[in-house]
Image (tube, grey):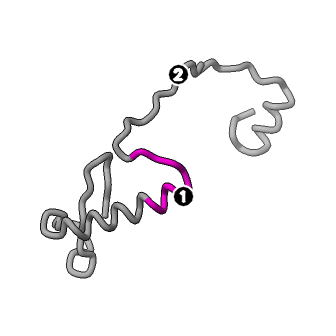
Amino acid sequence: MVCRGATCELFDLDIDPRETVDVAEIHPTALAALRDSLGDHLGRLVPNDWDAPAPQAEGLRHEQEELDDETRRQLAALGYIDD
């Protein structure tokens, strides 16, 4: 099963390992059971509303801070930046 938003596709990997034929319309009961099972599992990890839009990040600032010499030295030693 592959879900993108509220739309899910279902594939029979035994006969279609490349996932080329969506069998969701042929097996709606199996799709519903899998989706419910996945929703239950994910709900135990993180509460989720499948049909709700993704929350928007508000108030985030994307400012580049000036790095002090010690931080630059440490990042360079780790290979994140050039000296």
The residue pinned by badge 1 equals: 44
The residue drawn where x is 58% and y is 22% is: 60
Q: Nearer the viewer, residue 28 or 73?
A: 28
Q: Which mark is residue 59?
A: none
The residue drawn where x is 48% and y is 57% is: 42
Q: Is residue 81 left or right of residue 47?
A: right
Q: Nearer the viewer, residue 30 or 12?
A: 30
Question: Which one is earlier in the sequence, the residue at label 1 or at label 2?
Answer: 1
Mark 2: amino acid: Glu
Q: Quadrant of residue 53?
A: top left
The residue drawn where x is 82% and y is 38% is: 74
Badge 1: few (under 14), some or many (20 or more) residues near its Cα, within 10 Å?
few
**Residue 43 sits above or below residue 75 on the image:** below
Label 2 secondary element: loop
Mark 1: amino acid: Arg
The residue pinned by badge 2 equals: 58
Q: Which residue is the extreme one toward the left? A: 26
- Tell me the quarter of the image containing the N terminus: bottom left
Residue 80 in percent (x, y) is at 69, 40
